[in-house]
Image (tube, rainbow, N blue to C red):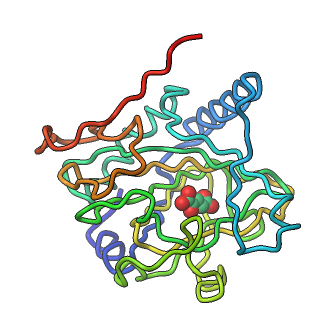
Amino acid sequence: MINEKDVQFYKENGYLLVRGVYNQQEVEEMRTAVEGIIQRAARAKSDQNHAWQGDFLPPEQLKKLVLKGFHDVQYHDAAFMRAAIHPRMTEVLNGIIGPNVQLHHSKMLVKPPSNGAAFPMHQDYPYFPHRDHTMLAASVHLDDADMENGCLCVVPGSHKQGVLPHVGAYYLNHKEHPLSSGTPCPAKAGDVLFFNYLTIHGSDVNRSERTRRNILFQYRDASDVPTADVHFDWGMGLMVSGTNPDFNNVKPKYEIISAK
Ligand SMILES: O=C(O)CCC(=O)C(=O)O
C-alpha cells in the first residue's frame, strides 16, 4: 500500500495522504454507522454541538457553526472496530510507526452543509502528550473533501519544530498561524490522511452544500507512554498490530457509570 518513498515523505513532512484505503462498500458501512450514532444520540438527547470555541472567528459566526462529534466510535458500532484494524490501515501504520501499534482513541467529525465548524490551526500534542511523539492521526474520509466543504490543511514539516505554545482551548495563535498557512489536503471518500500529533493542522468552515464526514483514529507505538494524566480514553491501548512490549506500563482507567 505504501513504499519507502512514502515513509520518507511522512518523516520529512509529518503527513501522508494514502488513497483508497477503504473501498466503496466499507465507506458506505461507516456512513451508515455514523448516521446510526447521530440518530441514537438524538434519541438519548446527547447530541450536543462540539464546535470549537475561541477567538479565531467573530463570535456571531462561531455561534452558527455546528460539529457533530463523538469519541470512541468503536464502542458505538463494530464497523469502526473493523476499520481501525483493517489490513490496509495496519499496513500503512506498520510502515510509519512500526510493527507494534496501539489505538489511543477515535472520533467522528461531521461538518454539516453550510455551517460545519472550523478547526483553528493546532497540534494535537497538548491534548495527549507522549514521550516519544509517535502518536499520529489517521483521518478517514467518508466524503470527498475540498476547501469548499472544509478539508484538512497541514503545515508540511511543522512537526520538526517540536511542541509549540498553544493558547486558550489548545489552538495556536490564529494571527501567527492562520488557516491560510496550511496546505490543503483535498481527498476522496476512502482516502486516509495520516499526520503526526506535532504537525500543525486545521480546517475551515464547511461553506458548501455537501456534508463532510471524517473518522479520526489516533494511533501510537505500543512502547510510547503518556507524560500527563490527561485524555485517558476507553480505546487507549488496544493492540491494532504486533505485541505490547510494556504491558505493565500503562493501564487505562475506567469509570463505572451505574445503570439507571
Ligand atoms: O477533521 C478536521 O477537520 C480537523 C480535526 C482536528 O483537527 C482534530 O480533531 O484535532
Location of residue 152 (image quadrant): bottom right
| In the depicted structure, whether residue 256 falls above or below residue 108 | above
Q: Residue furthest bottom?
A: 176
User: For this view, does 97 lie left or right of residue 111?
Assistant: left
Residue 65, position as x, y percentages in the image = 80, 58
Relative horizontal placement of residue 83, taking residue 41 as reference (left or right): left
Q: Position of residue 107 (x, y in %)?
A: 54, 45
Asked if residue 171 is positioned above or below residue 183 in the image, the reply reads: above
Q: Position of residue 45 (x, y in %)?
A: 75, 27
Residue drawn at (22%, 55%) of the image: 224
Q: Hey, which quadrant is residue 245 in on the image? A: top left
Number of marks drawn: 0
In the rendered image, the vertical position of residue 218 relative to residue 119, given as above or below? above
| Quadrant, the C terminus | top right
Q: Where is residue 29, by image quadrant?
A: top right
Residue toward you, 21 or 149:
149
In the rendered image of this protein, does residue 162 appear above or below residue 41? below
Residue at 16% in and 41% down: 244
Name the outermost residue toward the top.
260
User: In the drawing, does residue 204 fall left or right of residue 26?
Assistant: right
- Residue in the picture at 65% in, 79% down: 179
| Residue at point 51%, 55% (across, down) | 139
Where is residue 235? Give x, y as percent: 39, 37
Name the quadrant of the N terminus: bottom left
Q: Nearer the viewer, residue 253 or 234?
A: 253
- Ligand 1, seen in the image, is in the quarter at bottom right
